[in-house]
Amino acid sequence: MTKSQDNDVKIETQSTLTCPECGQAVTETMPTDACQWFYECTNCHTLLKPKPGDCCVYCSFGTVPCPPIQAGQSCCG
């Protein structure tokens, strides 16, 4: 967990991605300086892409949204 530079909001940098195809759950460290639009499942090799309206795979399939969204900013902008 890190602190945002703009304020005292604590940003969680770990999120568990769950594959919608096989159910494999893997905890990953989210990038703080870029969006992650694709993620290949380590079990079934399905390529995960954000759901419509979401900015990245963490917002669609993770337990924690991406750092920019946590900080109340727009992601990838």
Image (spheres, rainbow, N blue to C red):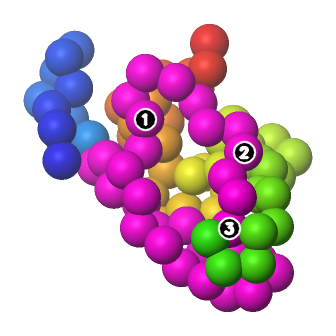
Using the rendered view, name the quadrant where residue 46 is placed: bottom right
Q: Nearer the viewer, residue 43 or 16?
A: 43
Q: Position of residue 28 (x, y in %)?
A: 42, 58
Helix, strand or loop at label 1? It is loop
Numbered marks: total: 3
Q: Position of residue 17 (x, y in %)?
A: 55, 67
Residue that mark 2 sits on? 38
Q: Residues within 10 Å of mark 2 (few under 14, many from 20)?
A: few
Q: Which tag, 3 or 1, sits closer to the chain's start?
A: 1
Q: Amino acid at mark 3?
A: Cys
* C-alpha distance separating marks 3 and 1: 17 Å
Q: Which tag, 2 or 1, sits closer to the chain's start?
A: 1
Q: Residue at x 26, y 41 (%)?
A: 11
Helix, strand or loop at label 2? It is loop
Residue that mark 1 sits on? 31
Q: Is residue 4 left or right of residue 47?
A: left
Give the dominant element type of the magenta stretch: helix, strand or loop.
loop
Q: Nearer the viewer, residue 66 or 24?
A: 24
Using the rendered view, name the quadrant where residue 61 is placed: bottom right
Residue that mark 3 sits on? 41
Q: Amino acid at mark 1?
A: Pro
- The magenta-colored residue range is 12-41
Q: Nearer the viewer, residue 75 or 24?
A: 24
Q: Residues within 10 Å of mark 1 (few under 14, many from 20)?
A: few
